[in-house]
Image (cartoon, rainbow, N blue to C red):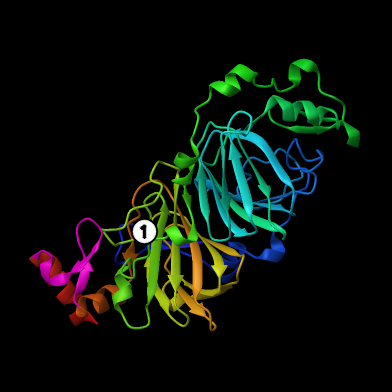
């Protein structure tokens, strides 16, 4: 990657070569599962689950786990893939855990014994499970399931397993060290000394963790019908050929509609928004000063990177993703006959500030719109005189 000063930004522009851009594209065929990622991997009913680490290692406990992109993003992104009837057992996370359901019907449960409540998630639903509570989930549908799972932070701290899980795993020769390293004695590894083993949490402590009612958890589940779309979420949406919509889900993302608020607003270390682009339309050239991951749920995305004189284009198909570095120009087009649906993950809890390419700012100004001093789309005629002057100069320059 090379850098240069971007003319419309205070930040240095990051320029990607074609090779670098494709290294940041994670295709479905390049996602490699690990079947021994966790301590419960040999338990009946849990032995068929697969774990993928796409960005960062996440909470995998296996040295055999393949990580597609190890570069720190401020969050990790992985996948839980499970056939029908398979269970992911009770555990606790120290950082945020968000499930973006791509395929399947899933039952999520929580509480010290998994009996405080359940919610059902289906394709397109997003669930943010609070930290410091036991949670587990099962594929209760008829098809193989696939969930994209986002975790807050580059260092997640690992997991706390329910004590019953550690007991059952030991019957299969599986142990966890204090460093959360999985040891498989059935595969020939020596059993760790007692003082090297992870000490299970006691029952009283497990039951002392915060309790969540089904109503409280339902507020953290954003189902497809709960999405609140705005067709004026981005400055360029006022332009012909740029029809897009956004629906915030987790945290403060890049929407520029002042009336939009996320369904779940507590800090996660990242934001998640749905971006929908009509077939043949696009989001024009922009950059952010944070890393951003684009996960394609429907359609095909054509992403053009860099300034026009160094443009690199990649295609991202359904179930694939692309990681855009901070301060990289990008535009996103929906190719083919279908509309494009993307889960947009941006690093940080702050509202994301978009830098638009000069041609977008000029065209929007000509259409009568600009960005106010709080970062939201507004009628240009209502903005300060200096802002209108700058817009007029930009129009004249083009």
Question: Magenta includes 380?
Answer: yes
Q: Secondary structure at mark 1?
A: loop
Q: Which residue shows up at 73% across the image and 39% down it?
A: 38
Label 1 neighbour load within 10 Å: few <14, some 14-19, many 20+:
many
- On-image quarter of the C terminus: bottom left
Q: Nearer the viewer, residue 317 or 102?
A: 102
Task: Measuring from the top left, give residue 223's x and y in whole percent.
Answer: 49, 56
Say whether residue 398 is visible.
Answer: yes
372 horizontally vs 323: left or right:
left
**Left/right of residue 274 with respect to residue 388 in the rendered view:** right
Q: Residue at x 45, y 43 (%)?
A: 268
In the image, residue 233 lies at what x, y percent? 33, 66
Q: Position of residue 330 (x, y in %)?
A: 44, 69
Q: Which residue is the extreme one toward the left?
A: 385
Residue 11: which quarter of the image? bottom left
Asked if residue 104 is positioned above or below residue 172 in the image, the reply reads below
Front residue of this view, candidates 177 and 229:
229
Question: Is residue 381 left or right of 164 when viewed as pictured?
Answer: left
Region rendered in magenta: 368-384
Numbered-mark total = 1
Query: Who's the residue at 82% across and 27% down the image?
Result: 170
Camera sees residue 69: no
Q: Which residue is mark 1?
A: 254
């Amino acid at each position: 990657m090379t850098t240069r000063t971007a003319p419309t930004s205070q930040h240095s522009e990051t320029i990607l070569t074609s090779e670098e851009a494709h290294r940041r594209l994670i295709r479905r065929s390049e996602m490699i599962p690990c079947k021994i990622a966790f301590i419960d991997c040999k338990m009946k009913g849990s032995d068929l689950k697969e774990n993928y680490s796409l960005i960062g290692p996440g909470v995998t406990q296996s040295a055999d786990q393949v990580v597609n992109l190890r570069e720190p993003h401020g969050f990790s992104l992985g996948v839980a893939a499970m056939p029908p009837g398979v269970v992911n057992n009770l555990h606790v996370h120290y950082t945020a855990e968000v499930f973006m359901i791509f395929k399947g019907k899933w039952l999520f449960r929580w509480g010290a014994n998994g009996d405080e409540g359940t919610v059902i998630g289906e394709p397109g639903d997003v669930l943010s499970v609070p930290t410091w509570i036991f949670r587990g989930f099962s594929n209760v549908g008829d098809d193989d399931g696939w969930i994209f799972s986002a975790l807050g932070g580059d260092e997640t701290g690992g997991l706390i397993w329910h004590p019953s899980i550690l007991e059952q795993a030991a019957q299969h020769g599986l142990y966890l060290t204090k460093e959360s390293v999985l040891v498989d004695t059935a595969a020939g590894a020596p059993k760790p000394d007692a003082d090297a083993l992870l000490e299970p949490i006691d029952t009283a402590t497990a039951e002392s963790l915060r309790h969540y009612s089904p109503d409280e958890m339902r507020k953290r589940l954003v189902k497809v019908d709960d999405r609140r779309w705005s067709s004026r979420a981005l400055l360029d949406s006022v332009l012909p050929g740029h029809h897009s919509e956004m629906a915030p889900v987790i945290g403060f993302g890049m929407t520029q509609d002042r009336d939009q608020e996320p369904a779940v607003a507590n800090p996660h270390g990242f934001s998640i928004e749905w971006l929908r682009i009509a077939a043949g339309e696009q989001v024009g050239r922009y950059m952010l000063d944070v890393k951003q991951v684009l996960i394609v749920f429907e359609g095909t995305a054509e992403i053009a990177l860099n300034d026009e004189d160094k443009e690199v284009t990649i295609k991202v198909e359904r179930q694939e993703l692309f990681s855009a570095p901070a301060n990289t120009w990008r535009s996103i087009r929906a190719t083919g006959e279908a509309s494009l649906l993307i889960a947009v993950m941006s690093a940080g809890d702050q509202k994301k500030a978009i830098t638009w390419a000069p041609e977008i700012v000029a065209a929007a100004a000509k259409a009568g719109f600009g960005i106010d001093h709080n970062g939201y789309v507004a009628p240009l005629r209502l903005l300060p005189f200096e802002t209108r002057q700058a817009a007029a100069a930009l129009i004249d320059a083009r």
